[in-house]
Amino acid sequence: MKLELIHKWACPYSARVRDFIEERGLQDRIAYLEVNETEGAKDRLAQLTGKTQVPCLVVDGEPILESRDIIQWLEQNTGGAQGAARA
């Protein structure tokens, strides 16, 4: 399964998802694409979602928006769940 997190460093919702990923030790399984630093990330986000909203978790080409929904998906599908999400 290919996982990408399209995010912004300064976005508190992106930070919430990144913190969850790090707490669960999942960072080596997820490619990070910062919209202001990664060439083409903003265009990819717009193409996938029709929006510029971050964070966006892309799972095998399918986008998931909203930090709470992303954290819930990660808990349920990555084997990295260790308790309740702080969403």
Image (spheres, rainbow, N blue to C red):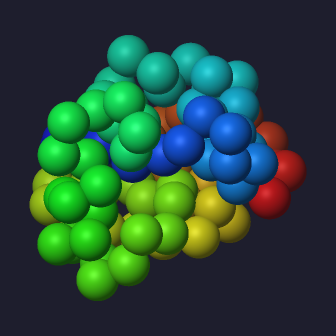
Percent coordinates x, y for residue 64 in the rendering = 41, 69
Residue drawn at x 42%, y 69% is 52
Residue 14 can be seen in this image: yes
Instruction: Left or right? Give the position of 55 relative to 49.
Output: right
**Camera-side residue: 35 or 60?**
35
Residue drawn at x 29%, y 83% is 50
Instruction: Left or right? Give the position of 55 relative to 23.
Output: left
Percent coordinates x, y for residue 70 in the rendering = 54, 60
Residue drawn at x 29%, y 55% is 42
Residue drawn at x 43%, y 59% is 56
Percent coordinates x, y for residue 60 in the rendering = 16, 55
Residue 76 can be seen in this image: no
Residue 45 sits above or below residue 39 on the image = below
Instruction: Left or right? Give the position of 30 relative to 79.
Output: left
Q: Classify the position of the C terminus by image quarter.
A: bottom right
Percent coordinates x, y for residue 24 in the rendering = 63, 26
**Camera-side residue: 71 or 8?**
8
